[in-house]
Image: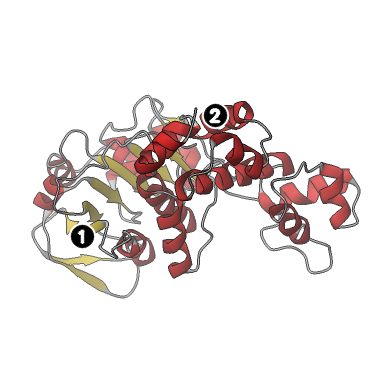
Amino acid sequence: MTSGPGDTSGTSAPSGRPHRVVVLALDGLLPFELGIAPRIFGLARDEQRRPLYEVITCSVRPPGPVDTDADFAIMVENGPEALATADTVVVPASYELGPVYREGVLTGELAAALAHVRPGTRLVAICTGGFVLAAAGYLDGRPATTHWASAEHFQRLFPKVQVDADVLFVDDGDVLTSAGVAAGIDLCVHIVRRDHGTAVANEVARRTVVPPHRDGGQAQFIERPVPDPQQSSTTAARAWALGRLHEPIQLRDMAAQESMSVRTFTRRFREEVGVSPGQWLTRQRVERARHLLESTALSVDRVARDAGFGTAQSMRQHLQAALGVTPTGYRRTFRAELSTACGE
């Protein structure tokens, strides 16, 4: 699930300073997941190489050590009052959530800390960090996800939450949730893309050597994450398709690249990628259109042809479905200086 770039909930920051991301470090935190936000947001730069985000970490207590699930603690220099300064709050996973995980209720200490969060602040949870947002009531009536192993328990504890256990992350505008570990990286890269466009997000992905885009709707668990070396994969077909997105591509043509029947190819593709070939192809074309709308002054009709949608109307429908915004609206967000050159 994604929202359109026109939704800037929680992204604004007072002029003169970068967008502030405050990461809430809870006892029992996973060091890897604690480091995702500083790493991803910390690498985002504008064209003058100025940082686009400022990332700080805080605890629910006064500055001091916070236990981790490893054999070391970390020293956190900010107390909960730092949450009042946040444009975005990130809650990583913890293995010591206590009554939050067992009963779905906040501790007094955690409730007092979250009371510092200003209305309108963007909220992000990674993995079981979603339990904290749900216990605080932020997810009532909203779609959300968490790690697949905790999803059933999550839904029982929080029946008002619309839990989707099959996706990598859910973007519901000003509240975003992800599955575990790698999906947290995907979500943070997605946020950078939503805030600042594909060029900035792709640069961050290159710097961290991660995929530049995994759609939030992709399955958390796929049957064959690493292809069996004794069986053919669909890698060559995907590379072939990416090289000719501007052309009509038939399923039988993709299957032919792997010398498979259409039925076998479709099954193998879904096992390896987590979505159907048609869904994957549409997502690649949406990404191509986004890149062209951001980085060129090509007309909407030309972008539609180059991305493989054929017509501007077809592209408009697909972008509206995927991003909730029209091509011109998307371009206006990230390339305001080009908006007058492009017809809707």
Q: Position of residue 206 (x, y in %)?
A: 48, 66
Kind of residue indicated by mark 1: Thr
Kind of residue indicated by mark 2: Ala
List the single residue furthest toward the bottom. Answer: 71
Which residue was labeled with disc 1?
Answer: 57
Q: Position of residue 229 (x, y in %)?
A: 79, 69
Q: Which of these two is toward me, 21 or 231?
A: 21
Nearest to the eye among marks 1 and 2: give it: 2
Q: Which of these two is toward me, 318 or 59?
A: 318
The disc placed on residue 321 is 2
- Residue placed at 20% from the left, 60% from the top? 56
Q: Which of these two is toward me, 111 or 224?
A: 224
- Residue placed at 80% from the left, 45% from the top? 266
Q: CA distance from mark 1 to mark 2?
A: 36 Å
Q: Which of these two is toward me, 127 or 18?
A: 18
Residue neighbourhood size for the residue with mark 1, other residues' Cα within 10 Å, grouped as few (<14), some (14–19), many (≥20) = many
Residue neighbourhood size for the residue with mark 2, other residues' Cα within 10 Å, grouped as few (<14), some (14–19), many (≥20) = some
Element at label 1: strand
**Residue 171 seen:** no
Determine which quarter of the picture holds residue 307. Answer: top right
Q: Position of residue 290 (x, y in %)?
A: 51, 44
Going by the image, does 27 lie left or right of 276?
left
Element at label 2: helix
- Residue placed at 34% from the left, 27% from the top? 140
Q: Position of residue 217 (x, y in %)?
A: 55, 40
Up-down: is 203 above or below 8? below
The disc placed on residue 329 is none
Determine which quarter of the picture holds residue 275. Answer: top right
Q: Are marks 1 and 2 in contact (CB under 8 Å)?
A: no
**Sequence order check, earlier mark of 1 and 2:** 1
